[in-house]
Image (cartoon, rainbow, N blue to C red):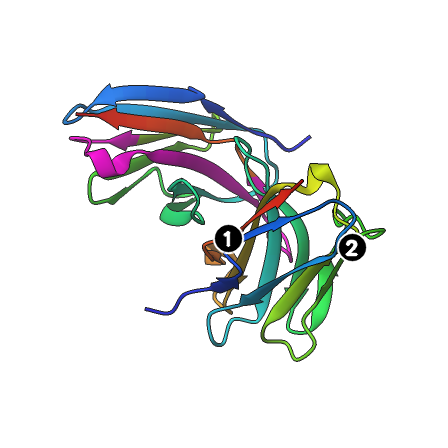
Amino acid sequence: KNQVEQSPQSLIILEGKNCTLQCNYTVSPFSNLRWYKQDTGRGPVSLTIMTFSENTKSNGRYTATLDADTKQSSLHITASQLSDSASYICVVSERGSQGNLIFGKGTKLSVKP
Amino acid sequence: EAEVAQSPRYKITEKSQAVAFWCDPISGHATLYWYRQILGQGPELLVQFQDESVVDDSQLPKDRFSAERLKGVDSTLKIQPAELGDSAMYLCASSGTGTLTYNEQFFGPGTRLTVL
């Protein structure tokens, strides 16, 4: 069964610190992996998209990595800010005509002053 | 910057009542999706449209949910009758005609439904 598992479920860090969120998946055939940021009460916003051949991609203070062999991805946040408090959702797309998205349950990050 | 619009943002209703949500995708986007997101979970696809045609509605509870996109632009999702378990965030997303590899979906702000 295609699944996306994220860890930790929740995380609390102090402002200015770095953190890393994990994503493991069993989706096959694989097309691409995305990380979304979802603020409370809002829709998800895309941070990064990576295909099979890409093993790292950055978007400002966000850096995503992908190991397609072990089917693992991570999202590293550098020098966290209060506005980084949100849920971060890992999403894997199946290769195919419809490109079905398999969503993880997300990691809820709280950045404290 | 173009955005997906949804309304209403919040809806409170009593069980057994009918509710409807509206979505206007980014102009030119042929594919439109409706998702349901229960608190603390990832979004779950309910229905996918390609222009005015339904591509995937396998997870749509068809006894009470219906969706339409008559002119291939905006879309309406309806629940009748609403049940307590329908309380959730309903998200609409759209995607353009890029390559399937980067068929990025853009999400609207969602409609938060509370059924009492």
Given residues A95 and B93, the one toward you in this image is B93
Residue A24, position as x, y percentages in the image: 49, 26
Which secondary structure, mark 1? loop
Image quadrant occupied by the N terminus of chain A: top right
Position of residue B26 relative to residue B41, above or below, is: below
Residue on which the image places disc 2: B80
Which secondary structure, mark 2? loop
Q: Residues within 10 Å of mark 2 (few under 14, many from 20)?
A: some
Query: Where, by quadrant of the figure, is residue A55 drawn?
Result: top left
Residue A6 visible in the snapshot: yes
- Residue at x-position 60% and y-position 30%: A3
Q: Which residues are magenta?
A: A76-102
The single residue placed furthest to the bottom in the displayed view is: B71
Given residues A69 and B19, the one toward you in this image is B19
Position of residue A72 relative to residue B37, above or below, is: above
Q: Is residue A113 left or right of residue B33?
A: left
Q: Is residue A57 left or right of residue B111?
A: left
Does residue A40 show up magenta in the picture? no
The CA span between labels 1 and 2 is 19 Å
First-in-chain label (1 vs 2): 2
- Residue at x-position 51% and y-position 68%: B25
Query: Where, by quadrant of the figure, is residue A39 drawn?
Result: top left
Q: Amino acid at mark 1?
A: Gly
Q: Amino acid at mark 2?
A: Gln
Residue B44, position as x, y percentages in the image: 62, 43
- Residue at x-position 47% and y-position 75%: B27
Residue on which the image places disc 1: B110
Q: Residues within 10 Å of mark 1 (few under 14, many from 20)?
A: many
Q: Which label lies toward us, 1 or 2?
A: 2
Check the residue under mark 1 and report the chain it is in: B
Position of residue B50 relative to residue A78, above or below, is: below
